[in-house]
Amino acid sequence: MDLLLLFQHRLFYGAILSFLLSLLITISLYINAEIWVSDFPPDIQEKHGPVSEESKKQKIIVGIAFLGIIVGVVGLALTHLDLLIDEEPTFFEMFISIYVMFLCFNLFALFILDWLFFVKIQPKFIILLETEGLKGYKDYYFHFRGFLIGLVILFVGSIFLVGVPSVLYLII
């Protein structure tokens, strides 16, 4: 098994996942930033107040699209992994592949979406009404903390995403 090829495979699908999810996030922020208010720093959430019913419905649609992208890219990556190595991939190989893919997205989200886009550039369409100038818009630590929490969530999520197909494979 060629370790460099496996590493390239993981980075390739990590880049695809990062691109597609970032595109979805950016477009949905542009359409209605309120969809993401629960992911904004606490002072912004507090000043903004409750989310509108329309935004709640839009969040469900975006959530379904988000999940669809994840399942599609992970499925494609695992299928390609199976073809890449000459034998059935082990649980650990599949776990590492998925975790590295998600790690790529988590790093991209921290450095590009959060720190560069949200904190530094701060396009007008991400500023929620009546929240202009709040400290949360410049809070690097809030996003770093989210990145660290994401590492744990991605670990558990990667185990789940590998575990479910593995169990189904054994049953079928």
Image (cartoon, grey):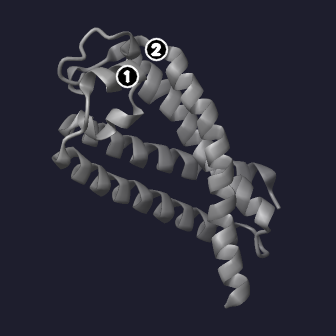
Q: Is residue 154 visible?
A: yes
Distance between the Cα atoms at labels 2 and 1?
10 Å
Q: Earlier in the sequence, mark 2 or mark 1?
A: 1
The quadrant the C terminus occupies is bottom right
Which mark is nearer the camera, 2 or 1? 2
Give the tally of numbered discs: 2
Percent from the top left, x then y, of residue 41?
41, 23
Q: Nearer the viewer, residue 38 or 101?
A: 38
Establish if 60 lies above or below 44: below
Q: Residue furthest right?
A: 1
Percent from the top left, x then y, of residue 5?
72, 53
- Left or right for 125, reference 37: left
Res 44 quadrant in image: top left
Identity of the residue drawn at 19% across and 41% down: 52
Tell me, yes or no, whether the two marked residues, 2 and 1, touch with CB atoms within 8 Å: no
Say the numbered circle drawn on residue 34.
none
What amino acid type should be assigned to the residue bearing mark 1?
Phe
Percent from the top left, x then y, of residue 20?
40, 48
- Left or right for 127, reference 16: left
Percent from the top left, x then y, of residue 18?
48, 43
Helix, strand or loop at disc 1?
A: helix
Q: Label 2: how many residues lie within 10 Å, few (<14), some (14-19) or many (20+)?
A: some
What amino acid type should be assigned to the residue bearing mark 2?
Asp
Helix, strand or loop at disc 2?
A: loop
Q: Label 1, on which residue?
A: 118
Q: Label 2, on which residue?
A: 139
The quadrant the N terminus occupies is bottom right
Identity of the residue drawn at 68% across and 48% down: 155
Identity of the residue drawn at 59% across and 40% down: 104
Identity of the residue drawn at 56% across and 47% down: 14
Q: Nearer the viewer, residue 171 or 3?
A: 171
- Left or right for 167, reference 79: right
